[in-house]
Image (cartoon, grey):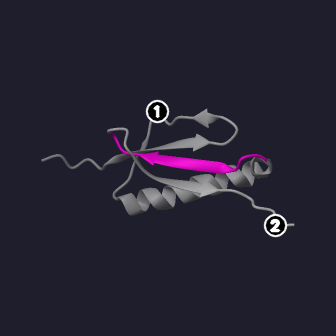
Amino acid sequence: MDSSMPRYFFDLHDHSSEFDRLGTELDSQRAAQVAAVEFAGEILKNEPSILDSKGLAVDARDEDGTILFTVHIELVDHR
């Protein structure tokens, strides 16, 4: 019986793309969603100027490379 947890990969897309090659073992897709949001928050905390351009997206992939969901953050100025 395989007791290993699934591995999720979080790819960052802002002005360029950075692909996660190591991944993170998490017990559920819900845990991966939380981790992706936290990851995006940390990026914005450290580099808030990302929102001055195209915004920020984090794709979450499974071990097969299928994108499961995307966290997309952009600043829309309505002035």
Q: Residue 38 magenta-drawn? A: no
The answer to whether 7 appears left or right of 9 in the picture is: left
Secondary-structure class at tag 1: loop
Residue at 61%, 42% in the rendered image: 13
Callout 1 environment at 10 Å: few (<14), some (14 to 19), or many (20+)?
A: few
Q: Range of the magenta residues?
A: 53-63
Query: Which of 32 and 69 lies nearest the eye of the viewer?
Result: 69
Residue with the mark numbered 2: 78
State the image quarter where residue 74 is shown: bottom right
Q: Which mark is residue 21?
A: 1
Residue 59 is situated, as x and y percent measured from the top left of the image, at 50, 47
Residue at 49%, 61% in the rendered image: 34
Amino acid at the residue labelled 2: His
Mark nearest the camera among 1 and 2 is 2
Q: Which mark is residue 41?
A: none
The answer to whether 42 appears left or right of 58 in the picture is: right
